[in-house]
Amino acid sequence: MFTEVNPPTSRTSSLISPRAIRAATLPAPLRRRAAFPPQRGPLLPAVPSGHASQLTAAVASIMAARPPRLPAGPGRRRGAAEARILLVLLWFAGAGVEGAAGTEPPLKCDELRLGQYMCDEPKIDNSTQEPMNCTNHTAYVQCLPAPNITCKDHLGVEKVFTGHEVGFYKPIACRNVNGYSYKVAVALSLFLGWLGADRFYLGYPALGLLKFCTVGFCGIGSLIDFILISMQIVGPSDGSSYIIDYYGARLTRLTITNATFRKMQTYP
């Protein structure tokens, strides 16, 4: 009696997948790459442009976050080359930003903002009650930058100030006086205005003689001149200003024309 015996089937053949069979037929370098696929490195942190310190921190974070070591092969060599190129590019970017920041021109001391400097009070001439060295309605006072301020002084020298060096000279307005005192003009107008003494003193001899002959226009002209002189509306005939105390009651005239709005306002 003959019995039919079937050959035993191998269970291992059913466990081999078609992908493994294809991988077994590949060359050795490609088999290693299929067995160990290249892993991605850490993502680059977002670095705003214009900050070299943040670029340096980004490079340090990339160097600190190392990816897991890969087996020797073309994939590992290519990943290392890409990392070197990336670090070199980041280094050049940081150096370029620092170079651009270093090429900014130094600030002039007269361009400092309020609070970064302090100006001295002007020296007043006792005879004129105006700042000394007043020329063309302009005088200058020295200004001292605050400590640890770096700027170019009036000589064009860049240095760090300690709060005791003169950084620049600030122009201030001054008036042109020619010996006519405000107090004397008011006193003459009050007591001798009916004789025209105030007009003679201010350089108006014709009006002074007319007031003398008419007794101050019967007192009405004397009263009007006293008000005008007291309000500093009538001044010396040569166009100069009264000698008034520097910190006294001075009249500042403001003129407004059709072109006033076109003029840019300047602030100290």
Image (cartoon, rainbow, N blue to C red):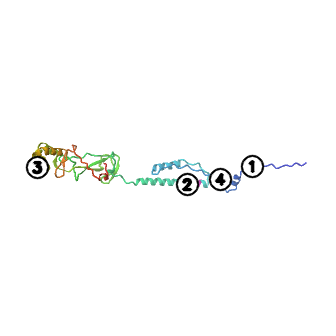
Q: Which residue is mark 2?
A: 82
Mark 4 sits on what residue? 34
Task: Single out the mark in the foreground, 3 or 4.
Answer: 3
Numbered circle sitting on residue 14: 1
Three-letter code for the amino acid on which mark 4 is drawn:
Ala
Q: Nearer the viewer, residue 29 or 211?
A: 211
Q: Amino acid at mark 3?
A: Leu
Residue plotted at (47% across, 48% down):
54
Q: Position of residue 125 (x, y in %)?
A: 20, 47
Q: Please report the bounds of the magenta region as a residue range.
A: 76-85
| Label 1 element class | helix
Label 2 crowd bin: few (<14), some (14–19), many (20+), radius 10 Å: few
Q: Residue furthest left?
A: 213
Disc 3 to disc 4, how far (Cα)? 120 Å
Q: Residue at x 48, y 53 (%)?
A: 91
In the image, taking residue 244 as reference, residue 33 lies left or right, namely right
Marks 1 and 3: CB-CB under 8 Å? no
Per the model, the C-alpha gap separating discs 4 and 2 is 20 Å
Circle 3 residue: 210
Image marks 3 and 2: residues in contact by CB distance under 8 Å: no
